[in-house]
Amino acid sequence: MITIVNTISMLCLIALPLARKTTQKHDKPVVYKIDTDTTEASYAINSNGYLEEVAENKVKR
């Protein structure tokens, strides 16, 4: 009986920290980097959210 209780308590001590680590990853906010550099780009997303071709005369330097 003591062996069963000891085994269950050891499994709980191992499983609880692992379960907490997986839930903490979802709590962090996701930060996306917005890259507005179009010097070497062929295409870019316009203000309406559509993909359009970037011409050399349209690129602001």
Image: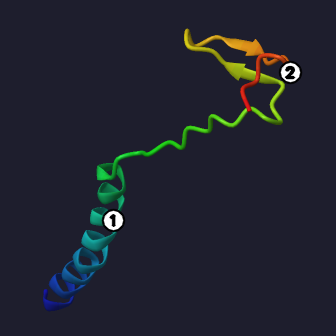
25 displayed left or right of 49: left
Q: Position of residue 12 (x, y in %)?
A: 23, 74
In the figure, is residue 37 to the left or right of 30? right
Query: Which residue reaches farthest bottom?
Result: 2
- Residue at image point 25% right, 84% down: 10
Write down the residue under mark 2: 56
Q: Which residue is mark 1?
A: 21
Location of residue 40 by image quarter: top right
User: Type of residue at label 1?
Assistant: Lys
Residue 19: image quadrant is bottom left
Instruction: Say above or below: 17 vs 44.
Output: below
Mark with earlier residue (1, 2): 1
Q: Is residue 10 above or below residue 42?
A: below
As rendered, which of 23 and 36 lies closer to the eye?
36
For the residues labelled 1 and 2, say whether their Cβ atoms are less than 8 Å apart: no
> Where, quadrant-wise, is the C terminus in this rendering?
top right
Horizontal side, residue 24 vs residue 61: left or right: left
Q: Which mark is residue 38?
A: none
| Above/below status of 12 relative to 47 | below
